[in-house]
Amino acid sequence: MKAYFELLKFRLSFTVAFSCVFGFILASNEVNLFSLFMLFVGGLLVSGSSASVNQIIEKERDVLMTRTATRPLPTLRLSTSEAICFSIICLVAGVAILLSFTNLLTTLLSLLSFILYSFVYTQLKSSRTNRSVCRCYSRCAATITWMDSSNRYNIVRSTDHVWYPVYLAVSTFLGDRLGC
């Protein structure tokens, strides 16, 4: 069970889900606690799925680095097929929760965020562009929650002004530990 918790990169996924809650509260006139909770759970699962995919893709590289050598895949505490199944379950459950309790645009932006982190950021991680991709990925969380709570597309651009200082603070103090 602990290996799955580690595969989820719980601290990173929790931080992404927390940013969703933060954006939801900022954009809402009135907060429905159940909707807020479901957004948190769905966001945690989708983010955890992308963190799992990241580790699946990087398992050979993770063996070589001291910081990542003790992760579940390099230590063979989980097989690649177990990690893939776990990632799919988390993604499907997270998307189902978001689709059921938020709106279509929020769910689609969550999937975009999943794709950006799993397949773009992971591939560019070793290049100089990694911070820019991480910024784009982290902005998706704020945009997602702003869209969910307001259902208005015209204010999405304003989330950059709200979220970017938060991202800079988090990435400056916790960036290496969060994988940004």
Image (cartoon, rainbow, N blue to C red):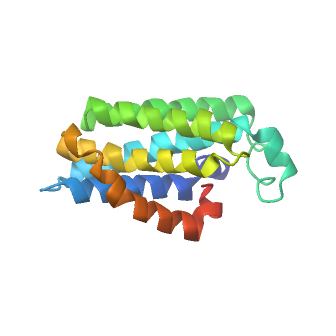
Where residue 19 appears, as percent x and y from the top left, is 39, 57
Q: Quadrant of residue 97?
A: top left
Where residue 157 appears, as percent x and y from the top left, is 30, 46
Q: Residue at x 41, y 59 (%)?
A: 164
Q: Residue at x 26, y 38 (%)?
A: 102
Where residue 122 appears, as percent x and y from the top left, is 65, 40
Q: Quadrant of residue 10?
A: bottom right
| Residue 166 visible in image | yes
In this view, the residue in front, 159 or 75, is 159
Q: Quadrant of the C terminus?
A: bottom right
Which residue sits furthest left? 29
Quick check: 72 left or right of 120?
right
Q: Quadrant of residue 74?
A: top right
Q: Residue at x 54, y 55 (%)?
A: 12
Quick check: 115 left or right of 63?
left
Q: Residue at x 53, y 44 (%)?
A: 48
Examine the rendered structure and indicate whether residue 175 appears above or below residue 133: below
Q: How many marks?
A: 0
In this view, the residue in front, 140 or 61, is 140
